[in-house]
Protein backbone atom coordinates (compact mmCIF):
# COMPACT_ATOMS: atom_id res chain seq x y z
CA UNK A 1 0.00 0.00 0.00
CA UNK A 2 1.38 3.38 -0.99
CA UNK A 3 0.13 6.64 0.58
CA UNK A 4 0.58 10.25 -0.54
CA UNK A 5 -0.28 13.69 0.80
CA UNK A 6 -2.65 15.80 -1.28
CA UNK A 7 -2.31 19.54 -0.84
CA UNK A 8 -4.43 22.29 -2.36
CA UNK A 9 -1.68 24.75 -3.34
CA UNK A 10 -4.25 27.40 -4.29
CA UNK A 11 -5.69 27.47 -0.74
CA UNK A 12 -2.63 26.18 1.18
CA UNK A 13 -4.66 23.37 2.77
CA UNK A 14 -4.10 19.63 3.17
CA UNK A 15 -6.96 17.57 1.72
CA UNK A 16 -5.48 14.32 3.01
CA UNK A 17 -2.18 13.06 4.38
CA UNK A 18 -2.82 9.32 3.97
CA UNK A 19 -4.36 9.09 0.51
CA UNK A 20 -3.94 5.68 -1.06
CA UNK A 21 -3.14 5.37 -4.76
CA UNK A 22 -5.38 3.17 -6.91
CA UNK A 23 -3.49 2.85 -10.19
CA UNK A 24 -3.97 -0.79 -11.18
CA UNK A 25 -7.03 -2.44 -12.70
CA UNK A 26 -7.70 -4.29 -9.45
CA UNK A 27 -7.26 -1.34 -7.07
CA UNK A 28 -9.40 0.90 -9.31
CA UNK A 29 -12.09 -1.79 -9.57
CA UNK A 30 -12.46 -2.26 -5.81
CA UNK A 31 -11.74 1.31 -4.70
CA UNK A 32 -13.38 1.96 -1.34
CA UNK A 33 -15.75 -1.03 -1.50
CA UNK A 34 -15.87 -2.92 1.78
CA UNK A 35 -14.87 0.09 3.88
CA UNK A 36 -17.38 1.39 6.42
CA UNK A 37 -16.04 4.96 6.53
CA UNK A 38 -13.03 7.17 5.77
CA UNK A 39 -11.18 8.83 8.61
CA UNK A 40 -10.06 12.45 8.27
CA UNK A 41 -6.81 12.53 6.33
CA UNK A 42 -7.60 9.35 4.43
CA UNK A 43 -8.68 9.04 0.83
CA UNK A 44 -8.18 7.32 -2.50
CA UNK A 45 -6.54 8.77 -5.62
CA UNK A 46 -7.85 6.85 -8.63
CA UNK A 47 -5.75 7.23 -11.76
CA UNK A 48 -6.59 7.10 -14.52
CA UNK A 49 -10.28 7.82 -14.05
CA UNK A 50 -12.83 9.89 -15.93
CA UNK A 51 -15.65 9.37 -13.38
CA UNK A 52 -16.67 7.22 -10.41
CA UNK A 53 -19.62 5.40 -8.89
CA UNK A 54 -20.64 4.71 -5.32
CA UNK A 55 -22.49 1.47 -6.06
CA UNK A 56 -22.18 -0.87 -3.09
CA UNK A 57 -20.67 1.76 -0.81
CA UNK A 58 -21.93 2.29 2.72
CA UNK A 59 -21.18 5.97 3.27
CA UNK A 60 -21.12 9.30 1.39
CA UNK A 61 -17.87 10.74 0.03
CA UNK A 62 -16.51 13.91 -1.54
CA UNK A 63 -15.02 13.49 -5.02
CA UNK A 64 -12.60 15.81 -6.79
CA UNK A 65 -12.13 15.46 -10.56
CA UNK A 66 -8.69 16.50 -11.85
CA UNK A 67 -7.20 17.23 -15.25
CA UNK A 68 -3.71 16.15 -16.30
CA UNK A 69 -2.10 19.11 -14.46
CA UNK A 70 -3.98 18.21 -11.22
CA UNK A 71 -6.24 21.22 -11.59
CA UNK A 72 -9.73 20.77 -10.12
CA UNK A 73 -12.30 20.58 -12.92
CA UNK A 74 -15.28 18.97 -11.10
CA UNK A 75 -16.47 18.65 -7.50
CA UNK A 76 -19.05 16.29 -6.04
CA UNK A 77 -19.79 16.99 -2.40
CA UNK A 78 -21.47 14.42 -0.18
CA UNK A 79 -21.95 11.90 -2.99
CA UNK A 80 -24.23 9.31 -1.41
CA UNK A 81 -24.14 5.54 -2.06
CA UNK A 82 -25.54 4.18 -5.33
CA UNK A 83 -24.80 7.24 -7.45
CA UNK A 84 -22.69 7.73 -10.59
CA UNK A 85 -20.75 10.89 -11.45
CA UNK A 86 -20.67 12.33 -14.91
CA UNK A 87 -17.82 11.29 -17.18
CA UNK A 88 -15.44 13.83 -18.65
CA UNK A 89 -12.82 13.38 -21.36
CA UNK A 90 -10.77 16.14 -19.67
CA UNK A 91 -10.76 14.31 -16.33
CA UNK A 92 -7.63 12.22 -15.84
CA UNK A 93 -7.97 11.21 -12.18
CA UNK A 94 -10.24 11.57 -9.16
CA UNK A 95 -9.66 11.84 -5.45
CA UNK A 96 -12.22 10.37 -3.07
CA UNK A 97 -12.27 11.90 0.41
CA UNK A 98 -14.45 11.83 3.52
CA UNK A 99 -17.70 13.74 3.04
CA UNK A 100 -17.28 17.37 4.06
CA UNK A 101 -13.56 17.58 3.23
CA UNK A 102 -14.05 19.73 0.09
CA UNK A 103 -15.91 22.38 2.13
CA UNK A 104 -13.51 22.12 5.09
CA UNK A 105 -10.58 22.92 2.78
CA UNK A 106 -12.49 25.54 0.73
CA UNK A 107 -11.59 23.67 -2.46
CA UNK A 108 -13.08 25.12 -5.65
CA UNK A 109 -13.04 24.41 -9.37
CA UNK A 110 -9.83 25.88 -10.80
CA UNK A 111 -7.69 25.15 -7.72
CA UNK A 112 -4.34 23.43 -8.29
CA UNK A 113 -3.47 20.35 -6.24
CA UNK A 114 -0.09 18.82 -5.43
CA UNK A 115 0.53 15.16 -4.66
CA UNK A 116 3.66 14.19 -2.75
Image: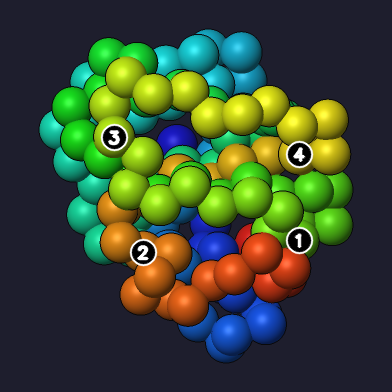
Residues at marks 4 and 2, CA–CA distance in whole angstroms: 20 Å
- In front of the other: 26 or 12: 12
x and y percent of residue 27 in the render? 50, 21
Q: As drawn, which residue projects farthest toward the bottom?
A: 12
Sequence-wise first label, 4 or 1? 1
Mark 3 falls on what kind of element?
loop
Q: Which residue is mark 4?
A: 91
- In front of the other: 26 or 37: 37
Q: How is the image coloured?
A: rainbow
Residues at marks 4 and 3, CA–CA distance in whole angstroms: 21 Å
Q: Is residue 80 above or below residue 29?
A: below
Q: Which residue is mark 2?
A: 101
Sequence-wise first label, 2 or 3? 3
Q: Which residue is mark 1?
A: 71
Q: Is residue 11 above or below residue 24?
A: below
Q: Residue at x 32, y 48 (%)?
A: 78
Mark 1 falls on what kind of element?
loop
Residues at marks 1 and 3, CA–CA distance in whole angstroms: 24 Å
Tell us which disc is closer to us: 2 or 3: 3
Q: Residue at x 84, y 39 (%)?
A: 90
Is disc 3 surrounded by few (<14), some (14 to 19) or many (20+) residues within 10 Å?
Answer: some
Amino acid sequence: MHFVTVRNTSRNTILGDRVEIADTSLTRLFGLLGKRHLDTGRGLWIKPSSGVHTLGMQFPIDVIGLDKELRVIRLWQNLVPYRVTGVSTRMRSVIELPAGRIAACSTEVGDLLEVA
